Image: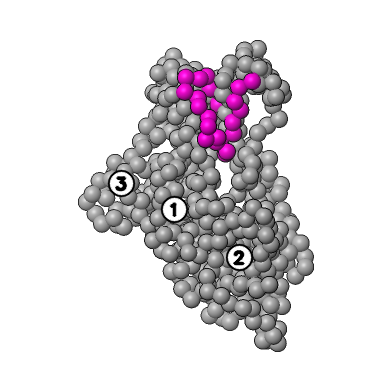
Amino acid sequence: MTIEHFDVLIVGAGLSGIGAAWHLQKNCPGKTYAILEGRDSIGGTWDLFRYPGIRSDSDMYTLGYSFKPWTEAKAIADGPAILKYVRETASENGIDRHIRFGHMVKHASWSSEDAVWTVDAERGAAKEPVRLTANFIFMCSGYYDYEKGYTPDFAGVGNFKGRLVHPQHWPDDLDYAGKRVVVIGSGATAVTLVPEMAVDAAHVTMLQRTPTYVVSRPAEDGIANWLRRNLPAKLAYGITRWKNVLFGMFFYNMSRRKPEKVKQMILSGVRAQLGPDFDVKTHFTPPYNPWDQRLCLVPNGDLFDAIKQGRASVVTDHIERFTEKGILLKSGKELEADVIVTATGLNLKVLGGIELDVDGRHVNFADTMSYKGMMYSDVPNFASAFGYTNASWTLKCDLTCEYVCRLINHMDKTGTKQATPRLKDPEVKEEPWLDFSSGYVQRSIDKFPKQGSKKPWKLYQNYALDIMALKFGEVEDGAMEFTKPSAKKAENREPERLAS
């Protein structure tokens, strides 16, 4: 079997993977690479999710790539527009020619003697085994299970005679026009679905166990559109990007310093939208502080409009069990429905479920510590793209891509082949990977790497600090160990190199 070798293997052809390829082409132009994508199309999340109204919950001036200005009028973009943007990026830069579709990566094994990864994947529906080698693996596979979303074990769910749907796998044949719909959940997916489905449904009820902080924001950024009309596109994009980054950082920091003030500010906005007679305390006042969980964004207040117009309503209660006609609540009330949508979240998955071993030793990611939010203690030449929880995903991913390129170029410059984060500081204490109370995080946090109590092991969730650390900070920081295989071993092994 001929084994192809690449300098870098990128896993995942979504927003992060396409961005990683662009940075690699620009900053490491001599490197060969391939993108292994388990599905049959580009786009990741933005291709998988097809539910009504799907959109970003971050503005596209920060969710967009640093190198490709967002030129649409809407700052809060819908899924198809984002998918078009990602695919355009891949096509315009020839990145799409490097993608191997239908390649599900299952296992990778690192050899320090050869300074190379051996990667095993399954190709296509027949799961044909494929083996490749690479000097560096860059995981851009996201953080959740693409196969199945999270649905609680609801009592009596088999009794329901209507249609039960999870947003992660939206059926093409679902017709909800003129029907009664219950959407279970109060997160970003639920607040997107409710106003969109309410356009055609007889009525949509958002059934939530606990409220979420919901903030209305204009779908279009007036300042950004003015700048784009009057300045070169790249300059206008850069100014808007920094404007939104700084405002986001200010709002997040204020939420941490003065949570009660921010809470009241958010709730006053909801009251202004829904009027004095609406029970904001019951339905839109969470029991936690702002940014203990991610805030929900509703463009142009569309959720509030649907409620005011009577096309949608909110019920805050607990589910007793499903019935033939709908859902029986703990309060004794029964919500009748023709369609029930379980917008109950994701199942997190560590690095796409890949199994790793280093020199024959199995890697349990829960036993590792995250280095700069992208690499893992004692795991060489292996990085992952993971975005911010309190800001746009791509902001951190762009910086991660730049750092990975710096690391690769540094190894070339110094003649080393292996870069391994080593935890040598005894003062570094373990902390949870994410300090987030959301259910989807708490259900799986024990399977994920830890973070440390001090840099470079600390996740600061701060774009400005990460720019200093990842773009300008020293690559040789005392924690990153650079080595190379013995000269004899290096001479004896030269894997076959095929252009990607």
Closer to viewer: mark 2 or mark 3: 2
Q: Earlier in the sequence, mark 2 or mark 1?
A: 1
| Residue in view at x 26 percent, y 49 percent | 227
SS assignment at label 2: strand
- State yes or no: residue 181 in magenta: yes
Label 3 belongs to which residue?
224
CA–CA distance in space, label 2 to label 1:
21 Å
SS assignment at label 1: helix
- Give residue 89's position: percent from left, percent from top: 41, 57
Which segment did they paint magenta?
A: 161-184
Image marks 2 and 3: residues in contact by CB distance under 8 Å: no
Q: Earlier in the sequence, mark 2 or mark 3?
A: 2
CA–CA distance in space, label 3 to label 1:
21 Å
Q: Which residue is most to the left?
A: 230
- Give residue 497's position: percent from left, percent from top: 58, 77
Residue type, label 3: Ala
Asked if residue 218 lies left or right of residue 438, the reply is left
Disc 3: CA contacts within 10 A as few (<14), some (14-19) or many (>=20): many
SS assignment at label 3: helix
